[in-house]
Image: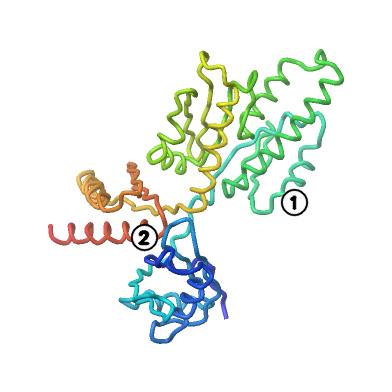
Amino acid sequence: MVWAAKSARTVVISGVPDGVLDNDVMSDILVIHFQKTKNNGGDVEEVKYPTTEKGVAYVTFEDQEVAESVLQKSEHQLEDRRLPRYYPLKVTPYCENVFSSVTSVLDMSVFKDKFVLEDLIQELKKKSTALSFGPLQSSGRISVQGSFPAIRLLRDFLLLKAKSLSEDKNEEGKSHQTPKKRQQKHRLTRGTNNFVHGAEGEKQVVVLDTDIYHYMKHFFSKELLANTDVVISDIIDGDITTLHLQKVRSRPDAGQVLKVKEKIENQSIKLHNSLRKERIYLEGSTRDKKKYRLVCESVKSRYPNVLVIPYDTHIDVIGSSSAVFEFTQEAKKKIESLFQNR
């Protein structure tokens, strides 16, 4: 028997009655419902409830075929003697999180005077098994691919090593450090860490997944990015966006920048765990691609928490798992209908 990936065995349940019963009891009721044959169910491996979305649960089956069978049932009515009434449930496929692969280029040349770089890379590979490392270039640069949180942890680890080298050199005397090496260290710090301390904490740097940043900027700009005490500028470079935070000079609170940085980082972690992305590829002529975009814009009005980002070759749809699935299904049906009727 071939064991299917967890994502292929998981479905998203919307419409779970919130606050009616204890969470543990509600989880048991969901297990009972999705194990019943009349609901096309089977053996349940896990129920995740509550989740970050109100009234949403994740149900993982032991067999992928059961998950597919449950999805084929047109209506699911949640009923139990402990519930005051029947509750209609909406069951949709689990959309795999695609914020799972970003690429970062690290400049390791700052370490070459203290470490054999090949040995250091081997140490990093053992420490970060979830990451994929490219070949080490003669310049000391190396590309790393993997999940954004894993790359962030790697950067923090490298920063500690860089800081340790800096402290060692300070003990030996600053006169031994050439301007060239200071420049190399500065590049490493900016490139591998998610924060940089300026004088008295005046400056901070936050590194984010670009899709997460777009979503945050669209839906959370007032709470996170529109602080009158802090000026934020962004540099978008493919999968990675770097935010530079600096306090307004007339403001005396040096800790305000750090507070904003922490709020942004905490929110980015929450979004990384809850958001999903689907991609709709644009086909045909320029006129046809315009129709794709118009359809997605029309569908978007019914999904207020979904972010639609159009590009030349595709459209990215970012939001919760269930919302993204429903959005893309509706958009694809409208697109198919549009081109069939022309």
Q: Is residue 2 above or below residue 140?
A: below
- The number of numbered badges drawn on the structure is 2
Q: Label 2, on which residue?
A: 325
Which sits in the foreground, 46 or 64?
Answer: 46
Give the image quarter of residue 38.
bottom left
Q: Is residue 254 above or below residue 326?
A: above
Q: Position of residue 310 (x, y in %)?
A: 32, 43
Residue 5 falls in image quadrant: bottom right
Where residue 183 sits: x, y (%)? 67, 20
Residue in view at x 59 percent, y 47 percent: 149
Q: Percent x, y for residue 12?
A: 43, 66
Side of 107 where 212 appears, left or right = left
30 vs 181: above or below:
below
Task: Say above or below: 258 vs 267.
Answer: above
- In what quadrant of the picture does the C terminus appear? bottom left
Residue at which label 1 appears: 126
The quadrant holding residue 339 is: bottom left
Q: Amino acid at mark 2?
A: Phe
Q: Residue furthest bottom?
A: 37
Q: Earlier in the sequence, mark 2 or mark 1?
A: 1
Specify few, some or many for label 1: CA neighbours under 10 Å numbering under 14, 14-19, or 20 or more. few
Task: Give the residue at x 36% y 60%.
Answer: 325
Q: Residue 247 location, x and y as percent?
A: 53, 21
